[in-house]
Amino acid sequence: MDFRLDEEQLELQETVRRFCAARFAPERIAQRDGRPVDREAWRELAGLGVFGLLSPESAEGLGVVEAAIVFEQLGAHLVSGPVLWSALGTPSVEGAAGGEVLVGGVEHADGEPILVEHAGEIDALLILRADGVFVCRREELPPCEPLVPLDPLTPVGRLDALPQGIRVGDAHEAARLRRVGTVLCAAMLLGVSEAALDASRRYAGFREQFGVPIGSFQAIQHILADMYVRTALARSATWAAAAVLDDPAIGDPLGASAGAKLLAGEAALENARAAVQVHGGIGFTWEMLPNYLLKRAWALENLFGNADAHACAIGASIEAGIA
């Protein structure tokens, strides 16, 4: 399998990176804390085609691989808003592709608590149930109870119940969206992992102790080397999983997506923790980037299955292959 990006993919990656660096610069991240989604920036994201990547009407040749490339950049810049659910919901919700409608989402099973990200801001809710895909408009949703979120850039509300909604897909489509969502969530975690590495590398290059940059200390070099290895491994698994979803004949979509989410989640969490350590006493303070990276990693880790769930899925896939 060739993991190199072609010229068009590299151009797509760079275009999204430049936009995110201008609109969601890390040095201004504290200014977004507790703020609602910037609708103007949201429409600009839509103008780049971010939410239409998975639409059947998207440009020829674009698929999950291109979406993963884009969502890696969205994750690295901690973009605010339900970007993942809006991309998944674009084929089913009118206005989502153009940025006029914010689509939230939830995987729902009976007996589980109903927690919805950006519950107070979304215009529509995509619901993935075992028997299909459903869409509810905002006015159909019951009042939500705001909760203290893991990620200060991702507000969360709890709903007591969900309406049935309009059915827009069957059980097969719900399973497909879960796999795509898992891989794109892995891509965002990969972005968090890379951002933690970049922030730590920059800080280690200019922060001095005993008259020399701390990056010259072997202990710091070992931490950075481990961060790089975790990021590289997560990238290989995530891009491979995206390629498998685009062409299931080359692998097992369930096992590949589970492996990507497992490795990317581990990389994001461990690298964010390492970034806090590299930054020293100020690393855990509220205004510093590692604080936001770690909290975003926690939030994404619990979206589309956590590490334990995906480890079990990988085990089941291996068992099925042996059988």
Image (cartoon, rainbow, N blue to C red):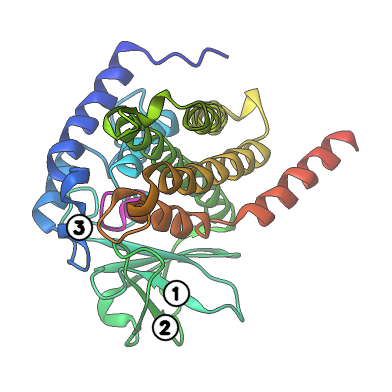
**Residue type highlighted by circle 3:** Ala
- Residue found at the far front of this picture: 210
Label 3: which secondary element: helix
111 w.r.t. 23: above or below: below
Q: Look at the image and say whether residue 86 sits in the magenta stretch.
A: yes
* Residues under numbered marks 2 and 1 in contact, where contact means CB atoms less than 8 Å apart: yes
Residue placed at 20% from the left, 57% from the top? 30
Q: For this rendering, which residue is in front, 290 or 81?
A: 290
State the separation of the CA atoms marked 3 and 2.
28 Å
76 w.r.t. 98: above or below: above
Q: Which residue is mark 1?
A: 115
Q: Is residue 192 left or right of residue 307?
A: left
111 w.r.t. 90: above or below: below
Of label 3 and label 2, which has the lower sequence position?
3
Q: Is residue 291 left or right of residue 258?
A: left
Name the mark on residue 193.
Answer: none
* Residue 100 shows in the view: yes
The magenta region covers 79-87
Label 2: which secondary element: strand
3 w.r.t. 15: above or below: above
Quarter of the rendering occupied by the C terminus: top right
Q: Which residue is mark 3?
A: 30
Q: Is residue 217 left or right of residue 7?
A: right
Of label 3 and label 1, which has the lower sequence position?
3
- Structural crowding at the residue carrying mark 2, measured as other residues with C-alpha within 10 Å and reported as few (<14), some (14–19) or many (≥20): some
Residue placed at 52% from the left, 55% from the top? 301
Quarter of the rendering occupied by the N terminus: top right
Label 1: which secondary element: strand
State the separation of the CA atoms marked 3 and 1.
24 Å
Q: Which residue is mark 2?
A: 159
